[in-house]
């Protein structure tokens, strides 16, 4: 083991990310103490760091980022290594919906460049396009897309019947996947540049964990709450070939003909 990085024991570590060049390591943190009763508003006003940043080569601290009156949720580096994006939520009252925000920090200085507020719903996850031009957020029941430079809204992708929990951008840049934590919902695939629905996929359980595309963008993996990971082949020709491979032995045994789509 190379070393151990430590944070304040009163803080709970969340998402961990390496910068594309491997020089920086970040973790988002939130205050948690099971022995104390406190409101979200009280936690927001604490002076605890919301994001820790270390030099990944020396394991020395580089910076501690504070998001005033916000709770950090997720962070992502842009693939070109120019920026660190941090998503956060802000609560105005116990009975009021949380508001979201996204913060852009310039690298390597880690200077705050700008911030955009997204009222009305909390954010649960973000994903950056492979060309570093756009960021998509799991925000409420939809997935708004912002341009990284300036954080200006570009379009809104799709809609689910319940709030989104996961979002992923395919490595080829063509597809955005969205999912929720609802057993009755499905994973949906959207055309990234238009927001049009491409496909819907369903597993045995749809209370999804992480979403991830394969490096060739041909397969989508999704974790579920039944301790399984489901893989979907997104190339129709590849999917048909696999189905035919399963049908051929059954056809030989039963004598039933294969579908016309099978060779």
Image (cartoon, rainbow, N blue to C red):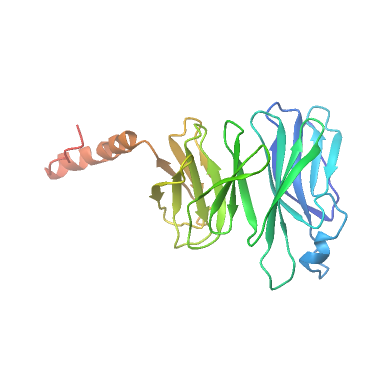
Q: Nearer the viewer, residue 181 or 204?
A: 181
Picture quarter with the N terminus: top right
Residue occupying the point 60% across, 34% down: 133
Residue occupying the point 66% across, 34% down: 78
Whole-percent x and y of residue 259?
A: 17, 41
Residue occupying the point 64% across, 62% down: 120
Whole-percent x and y of residue 117?
A: 70, 53
Whether residue 226 sits left or right of residue 75 in the image: it is left
Q: Residue furthest bottom?
A: 95
**Which image quadrant for residue 245?**
top left
Whole-percent x and y of residue 250?
A: 20, 43
Viewer can see residue 14: yes
Whole-percent x and y of residue 222?
A: 50, 47
Whether residue 112 sits left or right of residue 18 in the image: it is right
Picture quarter with the C terminus: top left
- When the figure is inspected, residue 81 is found, relative to residue 126, above or below; the finding is above
Label count reads: 0
Q: Nearer the viewer, residue 151 or 26?
A: 151
């Amino acid at each position: 083991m190379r070393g151990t990085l430590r944070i304040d024991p009163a803080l709970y570590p969340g998402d961990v990310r390496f910068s594309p060049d491997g020089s920086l390591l970040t973790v988002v943190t939130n205050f948690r103490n099971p022995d104390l009763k406190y409101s979200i508003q009280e936690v927001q006003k604490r002076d605890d760091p919301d994001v820790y940043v270390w030099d990944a080569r020396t394991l020395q601290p580089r910076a501690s980022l504070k998001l005033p009156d916000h709770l950090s949720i997720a962070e992502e580096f842009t693939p070109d290594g120019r920026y660190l994006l941090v998503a956060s939520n802000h609560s105005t009252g116990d009975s009021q919906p949380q508001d979201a925000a996204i913060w852009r920090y310039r690298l390597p200085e880690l200077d705050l460049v700008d911030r955009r507020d997204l009222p009305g719903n909390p954010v649960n996850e973000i994903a950056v396009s492979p060309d570093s031009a756009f960021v998509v957020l799991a925000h409420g029941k939809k997935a708004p897309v912002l341009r990284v430079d300036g954080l200006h809204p570009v379009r809104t992708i799709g809609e689910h019947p319940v709030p989104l929990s996961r979002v992923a951008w395919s490595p080829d840049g063509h597809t955005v996947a969205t999912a929720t934590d609802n057993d009755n919902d499905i994973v949906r695939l959207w055309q990234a540049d238009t927001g049009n629905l491409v496909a819907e996929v369903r597993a045995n359980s749809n209370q999804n964990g992480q979403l991830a595309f394969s490096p060739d963008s041909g397969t989508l993996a999704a974790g579920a709450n039944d301790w399984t990971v489901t893989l979907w082949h997104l190339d129709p020709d590849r999917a048909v070939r696999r189905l035919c491979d399963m049908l051929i032995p059954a056809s030989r045994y039963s004598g039933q003909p294969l579908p016309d789509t099978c060779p």
